[in-house]
Amino acid sequence: MSSEKTAMHNCLAIGFDRALNYENSSIHGQLTMCVFSINNLSSPSANNLSNFPVKEVVFDMIKLATMSSVSPDWTVAETVSAMKRYGYTGFEPRVEWGHACQIETDLSTEQRSEVRDQFLGEGLEICCIATGVRMATPNVAERDGHIEDLRRYIDLAADVGCRLVRTFGGQRDPDVEWPAVIDYVAEGYLRVVDQASDAGVIMLLETHDDWCSTAPVRSVIETVDHLSLQVLWDFMHPQRMMETPEESFLAVGMLTRHTHVHDGCFVDGKLRVLDRLGDGEIDHAGPLELLRLGRYNGYASLEVIHSPGSDYDANAVLSQHAEALRGLIE
């Protein structure tokens, strides 16, 4: 990376070592302070940089992934072929939506092994299971149902060789104060962390829905305090809440294990998601650069959502995003 690119962002990265240690369940036990560069970023930690050890910056390559919502009518074989054609190495099935890849919890043990081998045999992987689990659902019985669904998705992930499971916070009860919401959401994750840890699976809380701002997401992660729960940083949604990439990174950047990328623009005050990266108003270069500075080597996963039977060119979307993302991360 050029010195010009490194200087462009001039940010403080407060991070932790990324090596996973499932025998030590404490996130705080893994924290390491890392300073990469600093200029004009307001942070309590920035007042006395001499107190922080400076680590050598290692620029790992961010990898490309695609979600099944980009190509909902493609089988696993068709998906694998397209991934190889355009240079994607990770696949993120969006379960529950009836996509043709059919990676769902009703797969038999044999079918799960076959799916895993279809990807691994081509040097690819299922990098994340994108679920519709919503941990902040106000109704207790419904929330219990989401937790049981999460258990099944953890098992599915382990069986298909996947280490990540995406969850939502979802919509909260607006009459309940945030501290109480964070407590019951954290309690739900705590019911599942041991199963996830034993399976070698990390649950992810996405910056989405009522959790677009990064502060409550970080609060849940800190309350659970277990390496089996970390963050999916969708770059779009915190920016909708007027957070800068630097602010988001300081909150959750070094807790991030997976990312979603998709562009959009505001029309009459409403966000319109676009099929082309770079045509909209969402900053992807900033978050990706910050993550590289933080030694992130996970996926930038393409999230363009189309329903089965949609009349659009999935190949064109995959090709354009691959080219645009490479221009940002290489």
Image: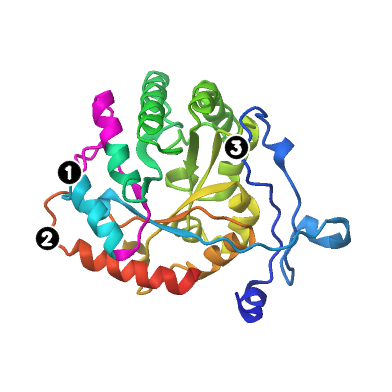
The location of residue 110, given as percent across then percent down, is 25, 26
Residue contact at pointers 1 and 2, CB within 8 angstroms: no
Q: Residue at x 21, y 64 (%)?
A: 315
Give the number of the disc on residue 100. 1
Q: Residue furthest bottom?
A: 4
Nearer the observer, 127 or 42: 127
Query: Is 182 displayed left or right of 85 in the figure?
Result: right
- Residue 3 lies, in percent from the top left, at 66, 79
- The quarter in which the N terminus is drawn is bottom right
Mark 1 or 2, nearer chain start: 1
Tag 2 residue: 311
Give neighbour class at mark 3: few <14, some 14-19, many 20+ (Cα, 10 Å).
many
* Membership of 60 in magenta stretch: no
Q: Which mark is residue 221?
A: 3
Measured from the top left, where is residue 70 in percent x and y?
Answer: 26, 55
Q: Spatial distance from mark 1 to mark 2, Cα to Cα?
A: 15 Å
Q: Is 104 covered by the magenta stretch?
A: yes
Secondary element type, mark 1: loop
Residue interval drawn in magenta: 86-114
